[in-house]
Image (cartoon, rainbow, N blue to C red):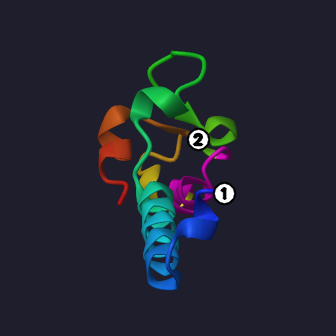
Amino acid sequence: MTRFSRMTPSALLASLGLLAATATLAADAKPSFESLDKNGDGKISLTEASNNDALFVAFKSLDTNKDGELTREEFAKYK
C-alpha cells in the first residue's frame, strides 16, 4: 500500500492544493540579478534575459538607456 492510498480524499486534495500554490509562488518569484547574469559581467543581456519569459517580455521597457543590457538599477525596477 502506498502512502497516497492511505490518505483521505480531503487530505489528498489539500496536499495537491499546497503543491499548486507552491508552484505558483515559485513561478511568480523574481529571479536574482546574479542568477540571470550568466557571464558575470554585471549586466543582463537580452540573451540572458531570454531564460526568463516574464523578464524577456519586460526587457525593452526596463532598458531605459536602450543599450540592450540591464544594469542592476534597471533590473531593480522589474516587478
- Lower sequence index among marks 2 and 1: 1
In the figure, is residue 23 to the left or right of 1?
Answer: left
Q: Is residue 52 a member of the stretch shown in magenta?
A: yes
- The residue that appears at 47% across and 49% down in the rendered structure is 63
In the figure, is residue 72 to the left or right of 27?
Answer: left
Decide: few, some or many residues near mark 1? Use Cα within 10 Å; few <14, some 14-19, many ≥20: few
Decide: few, some or many residues near mark 2? Use Cα within 10 Å; few <14, some 14-19, many ≥20: some
Place of residue 41 in the rendered image (x, y in percent of width and height, measured from the top left): 51, 16
Residue bearing the label numbered 1 = 2
- The residue that appears at 52% across and 15% down in the rendered structure is 40
Q: Quadrant of the C terminus?
A: bottom left
* Residue sitting nearer the eye, 78 or 15: 15
Query: Element under label 1?
Result: loop
> Which mark lies nearer to you, 2 or 1?
1
Residue bearing the label numbered 2 = 68
Query: Element under label 2?
Result: loop
Q: Are marks 2 and 1 in contact (CB under 8 Å)?
A: no
Place of residue 24 in the rendered image (x, y in percent of width and height, measured from the top left): 47, 66
Q: Quadrant of the N terminus?
A: bottom right
In the figure, is residue 65 to the left or right of 7?
Answer: left
Place of residue 54 in the rendered image (x, y in percent of width and height, measured from the top left): 55, 60
- The residue that appears at 44% across and 21% down in the rendered structure is 42
The residue type indicated by label 2 comes to Gly
Q: Which residues are magenta?
A: 50-59
